[in-house]
């Protein structure tokens, strides 16, 4: 059991990051902390996909003519490419979220979720 945990520690780190980010998005009342929780959750997802795409003793995915068409130990670059895109989308999402928090603060004078909801009652 302990050996299994040691060999798969990266998945435990991913689950920890995702649960910490989810907890921050649900439990925190501060809107900036919710945005930080979103970034932590996205980081956990990105690490999950990167660790799934990792392969020991792999080579670059360029077929060498001296080996023929056999792609025995080539790394699949799709996960890295998709996660680079996810990082860019995550940074853009964080920027839009923080801009909305700034606009909410200017409009309502607070970034606490409960105080903002009280103004609607």
Image (tube, rainbow, N blue to C red):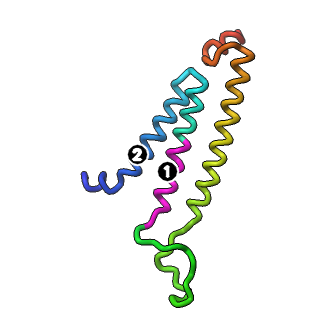
Q: Please rate how many residues cluster around mark 2, counting C-alpha atoms within 10 Å: few if below 14, some from 14 to 19, many from 20.
A: some
> Horizontally, is 73 left or right of 64 in the view?
left
Give the percent coordinates (x, y) of residue 31. 61, 24
Q: Which residue corresponds to the image point at 65% horizontal and 15% vertical from the top-left?
A: 110
Q: Which residue corresponds to the image point at 53% horizontal and 50% vertical from the top-left?
A: 46
- For the residues labelled 1 and 2, the Cα–Cα distance comes to 9 Å
Give the percent coordinates (x, y) of residue 12. 38, 47
User: Which quarter of the picture shows residue 96?
Assistant: top right
| Magenta region includes residue 11 | no
Q: Which residue corresponds to the image point at 62% horizontal and 50% vertical from the top-left?
A: 86
| Residue assigned mark 2 | 13
Which numbered dot is residue 25? Answer: none
Give the percent coordinates (x, y) of residue 118. 66, 10
Dot 1: what SS? helix
Residue in the foreground of this view, choosing between 93 and 25: 93
> Horizontally, is 22 left or right of 117 in the view?
left
Give, as a single range, the part of the protein colored magenta. Answer: 42-55
Q: Which residue corresponds to the image point at 66% horizontal and 30% vertical from the top-left?
A: 98
Dot 2: what SS? helix
> Horizontally, is 93 left or right of 83 in the view?
right
Numbered marks: total: 2
Which quadrant of the figure contains the C terminus?
top right
Is 9 situated above or below 119? below
Residue in the foreground of this view, choosing between 88 and 71: 88
Q: Please rate how many residues cluster around mark 1, counting C-alpha atoms within 10 Å: few if below 14, some from 14 to 19, many from 20.
A: some
- Magenta stretch, overall SS: helix
Is 106 situated above or below 58? above
Give the percent coordinates (x, y) of residue 26. 54, 28
Which numbered dot is residue 47? Answer: 1
| Magenta region includes residue 54 | yes
Tag 1 and tag 2, C-beta contact below 8 Å: yes
**Disc nearer the start of the sequence (1/2):** 2
């Amino acid at each position: 059991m302990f050996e299994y945990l040691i060999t798969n520690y990266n998945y435990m780190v991913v689950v920890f990051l995702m649960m910490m980010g989810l907890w921050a998005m649900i439990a925190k009342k501060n809107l900036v902390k919710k945005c930080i929780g979103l970034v932590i959750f996205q980081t956990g997802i990105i690490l999950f996909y990167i660790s799934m795409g990792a392969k020991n003793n792999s080579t670059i995915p360029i077929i060498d003519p001296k080996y023929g068409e056999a792609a025995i130990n080539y790394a699949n670059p799709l996960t890295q490419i998709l996660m680079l895109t996810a990082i860019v989308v995550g940074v853009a999402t964080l920027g839009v979220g923080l801009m909305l928090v700034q606009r909410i603060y200017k409009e309502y004078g607070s970034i606490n979720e409960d105080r903002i909801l009280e103004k609607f009652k």
